[in-house]
Image (cartoon, grey):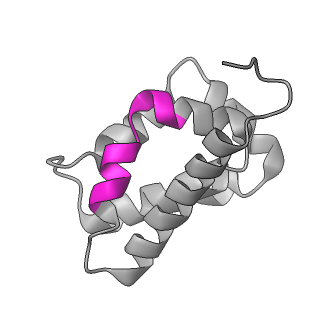
């Protein structure tokens, strides 16, 4: 997971990670769900990856569709401050996209 997060730091790698037919974001979200057997460390690595990918608007829409919000709400209550801050950062990015839609997106 850490290697993917490093790759996601490069802008050219973000879109293929988001738009792949293998649905990598779905796998990452499933690792973060409450009740998954993933360790807190792995969830932290998933958050690192997702925060890099969140710079691509397509990623935020896909994350919301995959159900990322409940896992993030659980992680902001974790005793690990780094994970808590990372989850809060991703929630803030999601909130901004919902509050200020992309100019090319259709209006409700």
Image height of 63 relative to 23, above or below = below
Image coordinates for residue 79, horizontal then vertical, percent: 25, 80
Q: Is residue 54 visible?
A: yes
Say which residue appears at 62% left-offset and 54% top-offset: 93
Q: 65 or 7: which is nearer to us?
A: 65
Name the residue located 20 percent from the left edge and 49 percent from the top edge: 34
Residue 35 is left or right of residue 51, and the answer is left
Q: Quadrant of the C terminus?
A: top right
- Tell me where residue 74 sits by quadrant: bottom left
Residue 63 or residue 100, whichever sits in front: 100
Residue at 63% of width from left, 37% of height from top? 59
Is 41 located above or below residue 69 in the figure? Answer: below
- State whether residue 77 is above or below residue 95: below
Drawn side of residue 17 relative to residue 1, left or right: right
In the image, farthest residue toward the front: 108
Q: Residue at x 40, y 72 (%)?
A: 83
User: Is 87 included in the stretch rendered in magenta?
Assistant: no
Q: Which corner quadrant of the image does residue 15 belong to? A: top right
Magenta stretch: dominant secondary structure? helix
**What stretch of residues is rendered in magenta?**
63-74
């Amino acid at each position: 997971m850490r290697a993917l997060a490093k790759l996601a730091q490069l802008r050219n790698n973000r879109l293929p990670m988001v738009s792949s037919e293998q649905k990598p974001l779905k796998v990452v979200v499933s690792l973060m769900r409450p009740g998954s057997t993933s360790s807190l460390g792995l969830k932290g690595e998933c958050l690192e990856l997702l925060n890099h990918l969140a710079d691509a608007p397509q990623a935020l829409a896909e994350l919301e569709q995959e159900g990322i919000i409940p896992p993030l709400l659980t992680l902001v209550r974790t005793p690990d401050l780094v994970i808590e801050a990372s989850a809060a950062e991703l929630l803030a990015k999601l909130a901004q996209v919902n509050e200020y839609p992309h100019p090319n997106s259709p209006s409700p």
